[in-house]
Image (tube, rainbow, N blue to C red):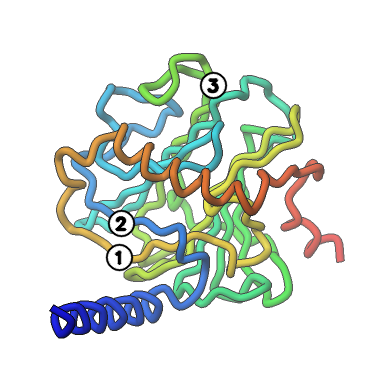
Amino acid sequence: MKKVFAVTFLMFMLCSLLLIGIAKAGNSAYSLTEYQWDAVATIDGKWTTTDEWTDGPVMTMSNNASFTYNMDFATYTIQWLVEIFNDTTTDAGDYWQICLDPDNGGGTTPKTDDFMIEIQGHNTLKVYKGTGTGWTEVAPAAGELTWANSIDVSPWGSTPHWILEISEADKTTGTIQTPQPPNGMRVAAYDASSSTQSSWAPNSDEDIPDQWGVIADFSQTPIPEGFSLLLVVLLSSVALVASFYLLRQRPKTKGISSAKLEDIR
């Protein structure tokens, strides 16, 4: 019995070391699998059908926001759905952010291969590229990004709230390129009316890739049946509750992203 336990423990440690090697940066406590979608979403800022986004894992950003993410392995198109459940105000200081660290290299400042997609005030999309010390704005390729947001209800929340849908055509070409996982990723939503930000990984900063979550692996088959919305929400909520014992949701008082600081300097 002791010998079996020792072998099992050794295998566990080896697997742990392998996982650490895969993660290598970012906040590995928050990771997801890149799943093949069942069907492309209609990018209109709402659930066009009740099962439109059930082919991706549901990831908790806070007790007020969640997102899901998936891709198509034939076209390499990736897409996100982000919902913030307690916000119906339209403020110029509101923003959505998606940060990408293609090689999951981490760091305490954005590297030159890092990118940030930011939608400001619900009507303006901008893309930023890391400089090594901050961010600078770059132009996305024509047709590279498609997005829409609106106030509507969804299977996730029956009270009207802000919903964002966004897709990137062929993540291997264009301005923003993310190769096969592992990749670092951060998704955030900021509500200016309450001066609060919800993010994944929780309490992460757009300027510190070490704090972002991780796309740890991928599956070329759709998310398994039975991996239900309720189950994933419960699992991600457990991780979120644990994080709040150490960190509270980080308030954000700035009206614009720190991405613009690079332009001001």
Figure quadrant of residue 20: bottom left
Figure quadrant of residue 204: bottom right
Figure quadrant of residue 47: top left
Q: Quadrant of the N terminus?
A: bottom left
Q: Are marks 2 and 1 in contact (CB under 8 Å)?
A: yes
What kind of element bears circle 1? Answer: strand
Label at residue 25: none
Q: CA distance from mark 1 to mark 3?
A: 31 Å
Determine the residue located farthest toward the front in the rendered image.
Answer: 1
Q: CA distance from mark 3 to mark 2?
A: 26 Å
Whichever of callouts 3 and 2 sits on the residue coming sooner in the sequence is 2
Seen at 52% across and 68% down, the residue is 26
Residue 95: % across, % down: 65, 40
Seen at 45% across and 78% down, the residue is 24
- Residue identified by numbered label 2: 34
Q: Relative to 66, is 52 on the left or the right?
A: left
Whichever of callouts 1 and 3 sits on the residue coming sooner in the sequence is 3
Seen at 16% across and 46% down, the residue is 224
Amino acid at circle 2: Glu
Task: Tell me if I can see residue 156 in this picture.
Answer: yes
Q: Is residue 136 above or below residue 34?
A: below
Whichever of callouts 2 and 1 sits on the residue coming sooner in the sequence is 2
Residue 185: % across, % down: 49, 59
Residue 178: % across, % down: 41, 67
Q: Is residue 135 above or below residue 7?
A: above
Q: Quadrant of the C terminus?
A: bottom right
Amino acid at circle 3: His
- Residue identified by numbered label 1: 217
Label at residue 161: 3
